[in-house]
Amino acid sequence: MALDLNYKPNVFVRTENLEEHEWLAWRRKGIGGSDVAAALGLSPYKTAKELYFDKIDVEPIIPGEDKSIMFEIGHLLEDVVAQIFSKKTGLPVFRDQTMYQHPLFPFMLADVDRFVREPDGSISILECKTSHYNTQFLWANGAIPRHYELQVRHYMSVMNINKAYIACLFSNNEDDFVWRTIERDLDEEESNILQLQHFWLEYVCNRKEPPLTEKPDMVLDALRRYYGPADKSQPAIVLAANFLPVLEEVVKLKETKSALDAQVRQLDKQIKAACTTMKSTWQSVSCQVLSPSSDEAIFVKSVSFLKVSQRPFGVASLHILKPAVGT
């Protein structure tokens, strides 16, 4: 499939006067930028099955964590992120409260945070993010979290724009701020469109649940929330014979885990017993610890905390973390 780049996006709906429930209803009519990673099975937060249920307006039996305040704060901080970006780059930023639609692939929607006017008069995209201070490592060395990159590339496709920026603020200090440039990649764009088209036509339009291919924890949480707890009043289900190897493997793994857990508990007891013996012997008096590399004794004063580390050659050595070791 060769991409036709001779198009302008359709105005799907003006969003400035929409209530939240109305805006969500419009989003269900297609795949938006924040949906892309989930549709491709690459989201760290949502499975393809959860996205499918959202698009057909099926609510989970067990509601998920209420993140409305977090999303509202993120939305309010978009202006701050845009202002910092403009200050650091010197590029003017503006807002367009419109949800757009791809004219050739009408299931593709874009509700872009901000747009940037380049010095040559061309228009680029700006995606504004906020994140926890501890997530800065995800952006190290010029990196962009993959689910965010997919979101921006989706917007570039819908809007037929060749350049975009993504900016992220990690605290209330503008120094804790990064921004990246994303250039359009038509090969990846074509691949993503084909996968999104498959998700929309094969699953959403046919009311067919997509397979669960994500991480086990995400899958189990999705099943729990959408199908609810087991109903013991219902008759038992007889599983097909092809499930037998899987069940046998589960039983073996549980037995192995149980045995290892028992070993861990026993080792914990032995460690506590050893530490108790040392503490009751040393308490506040001085003592000597033999160095594993020589016969020389290390003189220790007022031992209060010990850490055991394993050297590469297998000899355990005791390191006094505090107070300092004296000789």
Image (cartoon, rainbow, N blue to C red):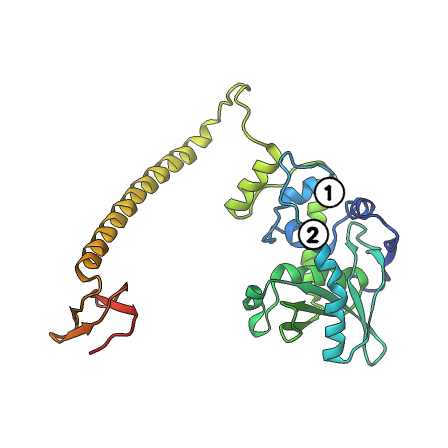
Q: Which residue is mark 1?
A: 55
20 to 95, vertically: above or below: above
Residue in view at x 71 percent, y 63 percent:
152
The relative height of residue 156 versus residue 39 in the rendered view (above or below) is below
Foreground residue, 88 or 26? 88
Please, is residue 226 above or below residue 66 in the view?
A: above
Residue 102 vs residue 228, the one in the foreground: 228
Residue count near mark 1 (Cα–Cα under 10 Å), binned few <14, some 14–19, many ≥20: many
Q: Which circle marks residue 69 in the picture?
A: 2
Looking at the picture, which amino acid does disc 1 mark?
Lys
* Residue lying furthest front: 284
Q: Secondary structure at mark 2?
A: helix
| Mark 1 residue element | helix
Quadrant of the snapshot with the N terminus: bottom right
Say if residue 163 shows up in the picture. no
Please state the horizontal and vertical placement of residue 296, each as a whole percent of the image.
Answer: 13, 76
Q: Position of residue 294 (x, y in %)?
A: 13, 75
Q: Amino acid at mark 2?
A: Ile
Outermost residue to the left: 295
Q: Which quadrant is home to the C terminus?
A: bottom left
Q: Is residue 150 left or right of residue 86?
A: left
Q: Is residue 322 left or right of residue 78?
A: left
Residue 146 visible from this viewpoint: yes
Number of numbered markers: 2
Establish if 240 lies above or below 223: above
Is label 1 or label 2 in front? 2
Residue 300 screen position, x and y as percent: 21, 71
Q: Residue at x 40, y 34 (%)?
A: 245
Q: Which callout, 1 or 2, points at the residue further toward the start of the chain? A: 1
* Label 1 – label 2 distance at C-alpha: 22 Å
